[in-house]
Image (spheres, grey):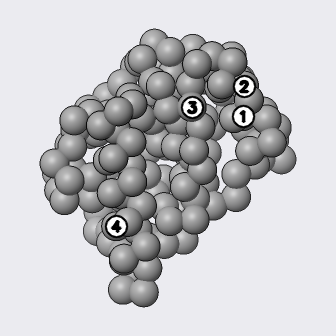
């Protein structure tokens, strides 16, 4: 099973949507704790779900169970806090469930995969859920994520 990820960074809305379409994404799962941005207004939870819907892409917010503050990362090491472990694993199970039916793309704000908590999510998806994870870069190319 394949799961995609991406960070919209400073991409304009149109290019972001094009990158999703290029990769056949049918559902965006938002993993931002706060689903809006002062600089990228089109990413607001008040707008994005409608925009995606117009392009035939579903939207789901899961920043409550997969948000950045639930994970820790130090250099190459990363993990979960004991108190939030169960919540995060339920979230990951939901993502995998969605990916059975849809071509799912987890979305965060940060453009840099290695500095974003989606790299930690990717590590868990690969090691504990036996999924293949691809990160879509600015230009729309999906790079396979490998655990090193
Ligand atoms: Zn992030």
Tag 2 and tag 1, C-beta contact below 8 Å: yes
Looking at the image, do the residues carrying marks 3 and 2 touch, with CB atoms under 8 Å apart? no
Query: Decide: marks 1, 3 in contact (CB < 8 A)?
Result: no
Mark number, residue 58:
3
Verify CB contact (< 8 Å) between mark 3 and mark 4. no
Nearest the viewer among 5 and 110 is 5
In three-dimensional space, the C-alpha distance between marks 3 and 2, rounded to whole angstroms, equals 10 Å
> What's the residue at 57%, 14% (across, down)?
18
Which numbered mark, 1 or 3, is in the foreground of this view?
3
Using residue 49 as the reference point, say whether residue 87 is left or right of it.
left
**Whole-percent x, y for residue 49 in the image:** 69, 35
SS assignment at label 2: helix
Does 88 sit above or below residue 21? below
Label 2: how many Cα within 10 Å (few below 14, some 14–19, many 20+): some
Question: Which numbered disc flags the more N-terminal residue, 1 or 3?
Answer: 1
Question: Who is closer to the viewer here, 41 or 39?
Answer: 41
Residue named by callout 1: 48
Q: Which mark is residue 51?
A: 2
Residue drawn at 22 percent across, 35 percent down: 1
Q: Is residue 50 left or right of residue 148?
A: right
> Which residue is labeled 4 in the image?
89
Give me the residue at 45% from left, 35% from top.
105
Mark nearer the N terminus (2 vs 4) = 2
Q: Residues within 10 Å of mark 1 (few under 14, many from 20)?
A: some
| Mark 2–mark 4 distance (CA, rounded to whole Å) | 29 Å
Q: Position of residue 114 (x, y in %)?
A: 40, 49
């Amino acid at each position: 099973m394949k799961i995609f990820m991406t960070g919209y960074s400073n991409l304009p809305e149109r290019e972001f949507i094009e990158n999703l379409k290029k990769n056949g994404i049918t559902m965006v799962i938002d993993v931002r704790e706060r689903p809006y941005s002062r600089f990228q207004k089109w990413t607001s939870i008040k707008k994005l779900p409608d925009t995606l819907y117009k392009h035939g892409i579903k939207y789901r917010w899961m920043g409550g169970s997969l948000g950045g503050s639930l994970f820790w990362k130090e250099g190459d090491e990363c993990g979960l806090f004991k108190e939030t472990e169960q919540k995060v694993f339920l979230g990951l199970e939901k993502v995998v469930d969605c990916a059975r039916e849809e071509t799912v793309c987890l979305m965060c704000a940060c453009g840099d995969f290695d500095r974003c908590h989606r790299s930690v999510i990717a590590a868990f998806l690969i090691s504990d859920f036996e999924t293949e994870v691809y990160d879509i870069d600015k230009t729309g190319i999906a790079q396979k994520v490998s655990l090193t």
